[in-house]
Image (cartoon, grey):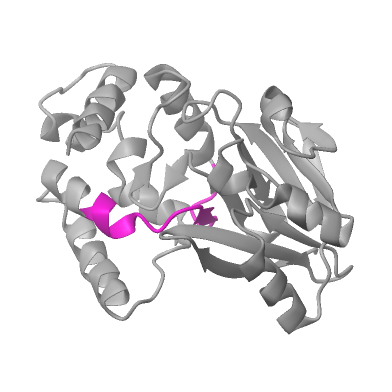
Amino acid sequence: MAHIDVVQIPVLSDNYVYLARDEESGTCGVVDPAVGGPVIAELEKRGWTLDWIINTHHHGDHTGANLELKEKYGCQIVGPRLEQQRIPGIDQAVGDGDTFSLGNSVAKVYDVPGHTAGHNAYWFEDSDTLFCGDTLFALGCGRVFEGTHEQMWTSLDKLRGLPAATKIYCAHEYTEANLNFALSVEPANSTLVSRGNQIRALRAEGKPTVPSTMGDELATNPFVRADQEALQIAVGMPGSDPVSVFAEVRTRKDNF
């Protein structure tokens, strides 16, 4: 069974860039390269070369080093079909239901609009690994910039159908701030309180809270639980439509 190794590279103030390398073939990709220097340094340290740039969406803090890295390594760039005019240097455009092969490791592609109009996510089933950009965060989700609340809820609903063991490699270290908001919504959620203690301990030591797992998010992330009675009661909307509940939670977070 194919497997990818993931190397987490913190850049800028709170971004994560990821190297993803197929163990069998040695094929290596970089996910959402905001800047080039740290990526190049990590590749050189490990003696790896770069075959692919994998973009989840068009924002500059996810595509900023596309052209620099493509020029240096001659790699190809894969990104969302619905944003291909906005992805610098794109070679392969993919969309919902497509697959993308990183050597022998194959990702299923999901369209997950909301944060941007054509945002993608890549799920490597054999490795229990999801690269979801700014759609799903540990204890959070992306701001709804180019889509609608309904689109974002539908996107999150797609992702939450993945196995509980799926590792969530999101693109930012927002977890502690997301925790503070989640606790304001559900202070009596004992699983959330326990997770919060772990998160604060990790951040106090300067350690990442990412990846989380889908199981963690389903138990504690208010944004993926808009159809659950406990969350609906917590926001004073029992029995309401999940899209309306999600919109309420997202609006509260925007103003938190």
Task: Please check the rendered image and state whether residue 62 is part of the magenta-colored stretch, yes or no.
Answer: no
**238 relative to 87, above or below:** above
The picture places residue 25, in percent across and down from the top left corner, at 89, 68
**Residue visible at 84% across and 54% down?**
71
The picture places residue 156, in percent across and down from the top left corner, at 46, 34
Task: Indicate left or right for 206 with 4 as reference.
Answer: left
Residue 127 seen from this side: yes
The picture places residue 211, in percent across and down from the top left corner, at 48, 62
Q: How many marks?
A: 0
Residue 152 location, quadrant: top left
Task: Please check the rendered image and state whether residue 165 is part of the magenta-colored stretch, yes or no.
Answer: yes
**208 relative to 98, above or below:** below
Task: Indicate left or right for 152 with 108 as reference.
Answer: left
Q: Nearer the viewer, residue 78 or 229?
A: 78
Residue 3 seen from this side: no
**Residue visible at 38% across and 21% down?**
149
Q: Nearer the viewer, residue 104 or 230?
A: 104
Instruction: Name the quadrant of the N terminus.
Output: bottom right
The picture places residue 183, in percent across and down from the top left corner, at 15, 50
**Residue visible at 51% across and 63% down?**
11
Instruction: Name the quadrant of the C terminus.
Output: top left
**130 relative to 21, above or below:** above
Q: Which residues are magenta?
A: 162-179
Residue 176 location, quadrant: bottom left
Residue 228 location, quadrant: top left
